[in-house]
C-alpha cells in the first residue's frame, strides 16, 4: 500500500494542479472530493483511476476497488488538495471521458448550454437534467468547465449519470436537426410561450448566457425559440431555474 | 450637501455594521449596493432613507430623490461599506418594512419557506416568485435573513416587488387554511406528483430545508404534499429549481 507523508510530495503537487483547467486538459484527468462523489464515480466503469484517502478514514465496506489504485496519505495532504473549507479526507483522480464516443439516438432528450459562465449554474443544470431524465448534455463555447471543482460540487454526482460533452454548438444544432429532433432555443424577446408547445417525445433545449442570453447565430438556427412569461416585475429568471421549468415541462 | 472624507467617520462605521443581522434588527434598517438595486428600491415609497454616493459617480437624471437624503463620500468609503469585490460606488440605507401590515387576500398566491438556509437559494426563490407573479412570501424559522447582502443580491431587486415577511409557519399555515386556500407542502417521500394537481386560482406552496426538507409538523398541517418525480439517477433537485417548477406549474 502506498503512503504519502508530505504535502511536498511530487504527486501531491501534480494533483493540486488539477484545479486548473489547462492541467486537466493536458493530463486528461480531473479531481473529485468527498465520499458521496467518489461513491458515485465508482459506479461508472473505468472512470476512477486512483483514490487518495486520509489515513484516519476508511473505505466503506460496499465499495469495489478491484480496478482502482488506493493511496493513503496524512490528512494534511487531503487538506492541501482540497479547495473546500471542510475536506472529507478522500479524493479521487478520474479520467475525462472521451466525447467522440457519444451518439445521438432518436429517443433522446438533450440539453445544450450556450456560454453559461457561472459554475454553480452549470452544475445545477446538470443536476436538474439528470433528475428530469435527460440523455445528453452538450456544453458549447464559453461555458464553465464541467470538471472544475465548483461545477462538480454543484452537480452533486449527476455529472457521472449522463454523458456530458463539449462541442461546437453550431455543428451540434445542425446535426440534431438532421436527426429530426425539434430544437428549442430560449429568448426573452422573441419566440413563443413554452405553454404553447406540446411536449415532444424527443427534443434539444438550449439555454444561454446569464446576462446576454443565447447567441443570435444559434437563435437563428433553432426550430423555435421559447420564453417563460414574467407575470411580476422581475426582469428575468435565474438561468438554472428557467432550465428546470422548461426541462420538466418539455419532458411531459 | 453632506460629504464624508474618511472611512473612520462614525456613520460609516455604523453603516458597515448593517452587514450583521443583529444590527439590522436593532436599527430597523438594511444596506443595499449598486445602481440597479437602488433604482428598484426608489420605486417603493418611503423605503430608501439615504443614498451614499462616491464623489466620482453621479445620480441618473430620471431618479426622484425628493424624500431621500443624499450624502457624498470619497470612493474609499463605498469600498469599505461593500462586501463585493467590485463596488459600484453607490449604496443606500433602507427601512425594513413592517410585517404587521400584510393582509392575505382570497386571490393570493403565496410562497412559504421552511428553514431554507442558503442565502443564494432564498434570493433566487424570491426572484422566481416575483417572476411567477406571486403575491406574498413568508419566511419561517431558520431561513436565511432576507436583508443579508447575499440574499439581496440574489433577488436582483425582486425583494422590492412583493411583500416578504418573517413569521411563525405553524400559525401562517393555519391562518391561510382558514381563508380557504389550498396549502401544498413538498416532500420527496410521500405525497402526490405535482402533475396530478389542477392549478388552483390561489394557493400557498411551502418549500423546505436543502438537506432535511420540510419539518414533519408542517408537512402534517398541509392539505396535500407534492413531489417532483425524479426520472434519472439524481437524488433530488436544488430547492430553488424545485420551487420554480412548482410555482410555474401551480400558477397555470
Image (cartoon, coloured by chain):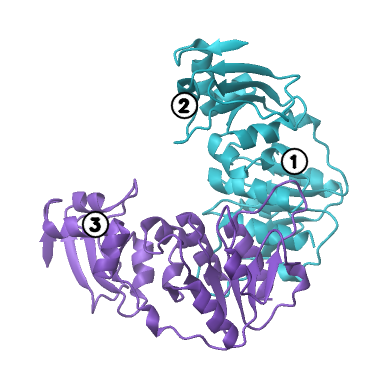
Chain colours: A cyan, B purple
Disc 1: CA contacts within 10 A as few (<14), some (14-19) or many (>=20): some
Q: Chain of mark 1?
A: A
Q: Secondary structure at mark 2?
A: helix
Q: Are marks 2 and 3 on the same chain?
A: no
Q: Between A121 and B75, which is closer to the camera in this rendering?
A: A121
Q: Chain of mark 2?
A: A
Q: Between B39 and A127, which is closer to the camera in this rendering?
A: A127
Nearer mark to the viewer, of 1 and 3: 3
Q: CA distance from mark 2 to mark 1?
A: 30 Å
Q: Which residue is mark 1?
A: A162
Q: Is residue A226 left or right of residue B211?
A: right
**Residue B194, position as x, y percentages in the image:** 73, 68
Tell me which corner region of the image, top left, top right, bottom left or bottom right, holds residue A80: top left
Q: Are marks 2 and 1 on the same chain?
A: yes
Q: CA distance from mark 1 to mark 3?
A: 46 Å
**Residue B95, position as x, y percentages in the image:** 29, 72
Q: Which residue is mark 3?
A: B17
Q: Secondary structure at mark 3?
A: helix
Look at the picture and state if A34 lies above or below B102: above
Q: Residue at x 58, y 22 (%)?
A: A53
Look at the picture and state if A190 lies above or below A109: below
Q: Chain of mark 3?
A: B
Nearer mark to the viewer, of 2 and 1: 2
Q: Secondary structure at mark 1?
A: loop
Q: Is residue B156 left or right of residue B24?
A: right
Which disc is residue A79 wearing?
Answer: 2
**Residue B24, position as x, y percentages in the image:** 29, 64
Q: Earlier in the sequence, mark 2 or mark 1?
A: 2
Tell me which corner region of the image, top left, top right, bottom left or bottom right, holds residue B210: bottom right
Q: Between A134 and A236, which is closer to the camera in this rendering?
A: A134
Amino acid at each position: 500500500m502506498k503512503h504519502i507523508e508530505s504535502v511536498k510530495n511530487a504527486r501531491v503537487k501534480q494533483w493540486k494542479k488539477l484545479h486548473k483547467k489547462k492541467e486537466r486538459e493536458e493530463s486528461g484527468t480531473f479531481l473529485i472530493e468527498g465520499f458521496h462523489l467518489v461513491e458515485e464515480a465508482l459506479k461508472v466503469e473505468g472512470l476512477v483511476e486512483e483514490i487518495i484517502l486520509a489515513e484516519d478514514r476508511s473505505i466503506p465496506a460496499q465499495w469495489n476497488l478491484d480496478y482502482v489504485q488506493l493511496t493513503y496519505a496524512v490528512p494534511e495532504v487531503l487538506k492541501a488538495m482540497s479547495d473546500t473549507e471542510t475536506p472529507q479526507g478522500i479524493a479521487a483522480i478520474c479520467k475525462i471521458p472521451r466525447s467522440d464516443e457519444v451518439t445521438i439516438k432518436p429517443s433522446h432528450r438533450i440539453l445544450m448550454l450556450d456560454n453559461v459562465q457561472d459554475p454553480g449554474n452549470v452544475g445545477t443544470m446538470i443536476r436538474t437534467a439528470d433528475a428530469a431524465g435527460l440523455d445528453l448534455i452538450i456544453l458549447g463555447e464559453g461555458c464553465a468547465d464541467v470538471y472544475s471543482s465548483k461545477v462538480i460540487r454543484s452537480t452533486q454526482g449527476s455529472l457521472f449519470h449522463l454523458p456530458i460533452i463539449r462541442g461546437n454548438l453550431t455543428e451540434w444544432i445542425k446535426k440534431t436537426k438532421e436527426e429530426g429532433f425539434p430544437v428549442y432555443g430560449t429568448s426573452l424577446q422573441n419566440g413563443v410561450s413554452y405553454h404553447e408547445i406540446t411536449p415532444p417525445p424527443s427534443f434539444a433545449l438550449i439555454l444561454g448566457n446569464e446576462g446576454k442570453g443565447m447567441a443570435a447565430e444559434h437563435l437563428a438556427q433553432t426550430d423555435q425559440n421559447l420564453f417563460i412569461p414574467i407575470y411580476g416585475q422581475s426582469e428575468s429568471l435565474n438561468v438554472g431555474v428557467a432550465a428546470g421549468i422548461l426541462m420538466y415541462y418539455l419532458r411531459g
